[in-house]
Image: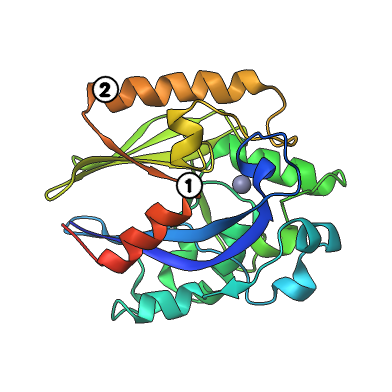
Amino acid sequence: MKISVLYLGRIECRRDNLIQCSDLSQMIKSPISAILVQHPELGNVLYDTGNSPFYASEYSRHTLETYPIPEFISIEDALKKKGLQTSDIDRIILSHLHFDHVGGLKYFRGTKAIKNVLVSEAELKNAYYQVMTGQGGAYVKSLFDLDGIEYKTIKEDTVLAEDMRLFIQQSHTPGLIGMMLKSRSKGNLLVTGDTIYTRENYEKELPPGGSINKTQKEFFDNLAWIKKMERQNSAAIIYGRDFDQITDLNREGSFE
Ligand SMILES: [Zn+2]
């Protein structure tokens, strides 16, 4: 199994959006990323797809003001750097359906991957409910409701292969898929997605500010569960939006 962390540019937002703090003027770089797993049994699997190339017209003004995008790298270009085209991807896993994770789906129109998009059932239901009741927020229907897309849903922890397991978290959104990968060179890797944005959130046990979680309990319950999994599996964690970690892993290149 070969693993690559792909850097897809960044948004820049108030630090408080990621890590609760009293200074509301402080800004932070928040990376957009995807993970490519080239797997001997499962083929080329992609976890998340980044922003839409048409973000300026597709995202709401509120989104663009709250999360400006000073750097955009398309999933298509990131895959090219790995010698792959979008048509080489066999399956897409979406951690959740927020705009910065599903915006790149449009690059997969007409490919086999668009017929094989894995998401949690709770997440898919929540995203449609939100956009159809005028409470879209970070969900943008045109990004995930594409012609020809076929979703496969999971309800619970799912073993895709002996070295690749998915789990469903109840924080950030109602069904956010995390991933456990058994790598040869780095041991067990726990991919949290947006439930735990940065190392600082995790180590100092600081929830995000703002209103992304309905209660802080969701964050702390999930954090306790991840810490338990980390101990039980002697795992290293890949956080959802840790700029230094994502850019370091991207620079380092693919590993087994
Ligand atoms: Zn999100």
Which of 11/121 is in front? 11
Above or below for 233 versus 121: above
Q: Which mark is residue 240?
A: 1
Residue identified by numbered label 2:
231
Residue at the image point whose x is 68% and y is 41% from the top:
16
At horizontal 53% and vertical 76% (from top left) the residue drawn is 107
Please tell me whether mark 1 sits on a helix, a strand or a loop.
loop
Inspect the image, locate mark 1, and give the three-letter code of the amino acid beneath it.
Answer: Gly
Q: Which of marks 1 and 2 is nearer the N terminus?
A: 2
Assign a secondary structure to mark 2.
Answer: helix
Please tell me how crowded label 1 is: few (under 14), some (14-19), or many (20+) other residues with Cα within 10 Å. Answer: many
Q: Looking at this rendering, what residue extends furthest in the right direction?
A: 134
Between 84 and 151, the residue placed more toward the observer is: 84
Amino acid type, label 2: Arg
Q: Where is residue 5 in the image (x, y as percent from the top left)?
A: 35, 60
What residue is drawn where x is 77% and y is 58%?
A: 63
- 215 w.r.t. 176: above or below: above
Residue 57 in sight in this render: yes
Name the quarter where the C terminus is drawn.
bottom left
User: Where residue 254 sits: x, y (%)?
Assistant: 23, 65
For residue 68, which quarter of the picture?
bottom right
Q: Residue at x 55, y 68 (%)?
A: 104
Q: In which quarter of the image is the N terminus?
A: bottom left
Left or right: residue 60 versus residue 11 is right
How many numbered circles does the render carry? Answer: 2
Cβ at disc 1 under 8 Å from ligand 1: yes
Q: How far apart are marks 1 and 2 (CA)?
A: 19 Å
